[in-house]
Image (cartoon, rainbow, N blue to C red):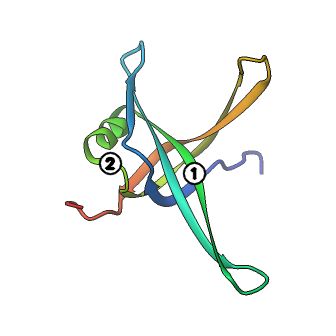
Amino acid sequence: MKQGINKVTLVGNVGDNPRINETKGNSIVANLSLATNESYKDKDGNKQESTEWHRIVAWDKRAEILRDYVKKGDSLYVEGKLKTSSYDDKDGIKRYSTEIWCENFLFLSPKNS
């Protein structure tokens, strides 16, 4: 296989209302956090729960739809790809940030919730 696959599928709850920005090129970008929850039993049989937070980025028309229809607590199905960038923090240490660039999403919350 010559090409790899970079595909992410998540179902979770929006952690806060989407943050909307406009780029210098007049593109609209939405940033939001999505929480996915997992429950399992530990080795002693006790139920454990964990939450993983994901940073979602959507552009243009998808960003507009998220801006207009999504709010904190809503359930979303998100498909996208991983994008990792790096930056130097205030102490000059290289840091990495991984986001999911949204390619598709579905609303899972009832319309008037």
- Residue nearest the observer in this picture, 78 or 90: 90
Q: Quarter holding the C terminus?
A: bottom left
Q: Are marks 1 and 2 in contact (CB under 8 Å)?
A: no
- Residue nearest the observer in this picture, 58 or 103: 58
How far apart are the two marked residues, 1 and 2, measured between alpha carbons? Answer: 16 Å
Q: Residue at x 61, y 74 (%)?
A: 39
Disc number placed over residue 113 in the picture, else none = none
- Residue nearest the observer in this picture, 38 or 44: 44
- The three-letter amino acid code for the residue at tag 1 is Trp
- The three-letter amino acid code for the residue at tag 2 is Lys
Q: Is residue 98 above or below residue 35?
A: above
- Residue nearest the observer in this picture, 65 or 94: 94
Q: Which residue is denoted by mark 2 in the rendering?
A: 71
Q: Residue at x 36, y 43 (%)?
A: 17
Q: Secondary structure at mark 2?
A: loop
Q: Residue at x 77, y 85 (%)?
A: 44
